[in-house]
Amino acid sequence: MNRDVVLRHLNTWFESIHPMQCYGFLHPAVTYRDLEEDRMSPVLSAAVCAVSSLFLSSGSEDRAFAERCNRVVKLQISSTTGIFSKQRLAYLVLTSLYDFMIGDWSKLWEYTATAARLVMALQLNVDTVGGSFIEQESARRLAWQVYLNDRILSGGFDEYVVLAHDKLLLSLPCSEQNFQDNKPVRTEPLRMDLDAASHQLESPSMRASYIKLFAIRREVLRYV
C-alpha cells in the first residue's frame, strides 16, 4: 500500500480515533517510525485505513476502499485461526471497530467473543512483566478495549458476558502523556485491593475513569 495513503489515514487515526475509549493502543512515535522504516505490518496498515476511511469521507470510492482494506484484515484473521498473538488480537479489535461503525452487529458479536477468549489465552487479563513499558501499556489498552466491547454487547445480561469481571486483574490505562513519553507508572486496578492501595499510584487517567464509569453502568443495567 502506498506510504502516503497510509500516512494520511494514520494521521486521521491519531487525531480522531486514538483518543476514543481504549483505542489508543498504538504508540504514535513507534507507529510513525515503523511506517517510515517500512516495518509497519501491511495488515495493520489495512486495518487503520479501513477505519480511518470512514472518518475521512462518505463517498462511494472511499467506502469501497475501506471495505477492501477490511477484507484484507478479515482474511488475515481467518487464515491465522488457532494462532494466539497480540498482533492478531489487535486485528480483531480493529475490525470489530469497523463492524461497529458500519452497523454489522453479527460480525462484531463474533469477533468480540473471539477477542475476549484470546485475552485470556494470552494472559493479558493480568499485568505482564515482559517487554517495554510501551508494550505493556499497549497490551493493557487492548485488553480493556475488549472488556468495553464485551460489556457493550452484553448489556446487563450475565449470560452474554464472555470476559468475566473477576478475572480482570490488570491495571487500568495510564495517562496519555506517560504512555507517549514512555514513562513507567503504576496505576490502580478496576477493583482496588490492599496491595495496590499500599503503593503510590498515578491519578486515574481519562481512559481509566471511562472504564470505571462503564463498570458502574454495567452494574446498574443488571438491576434495572
Image (spheres, rainbow, N blue to C red):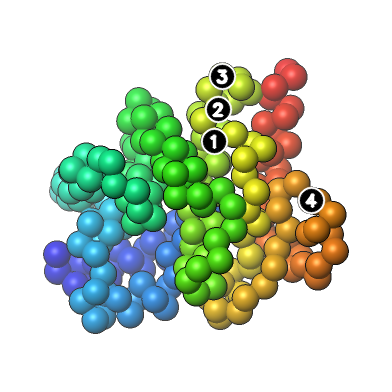
Residue designated by label 1 = 163
Q: Residue at x 18, y 43 (%)?
A: 79
Disc ID at residue 161: 2
Disc ID at residue 159: 3
**66 relative position to 55: left or right:** left
Q: CA distance from mark 1 to mark 4?
A: 19 Å
Q: x, y percentage for residue 197? A: 84, 59
Mark 3: amino acid? Glu
Q: Residue at x 25, y 40 (%)?
A: 81
Q: CA distance from mark 1 to mark 3?
A: 11 Å
Q: Are marks 2 and 1 in contact (CB under 8 Å)?
A: yes
Q: CA distance from mark 2 to mark 4?
A: 22 Å
Which quarter of the figure is the C terminus placed in? top right
Judge the density around disc 2: few (<14), some (14-19), many (≥20) Cα neighbours within 10 Å.
some
Mark 2: amino acid? Val
Residue designated by label 4 = 192
Mark 4: amino acid? Met
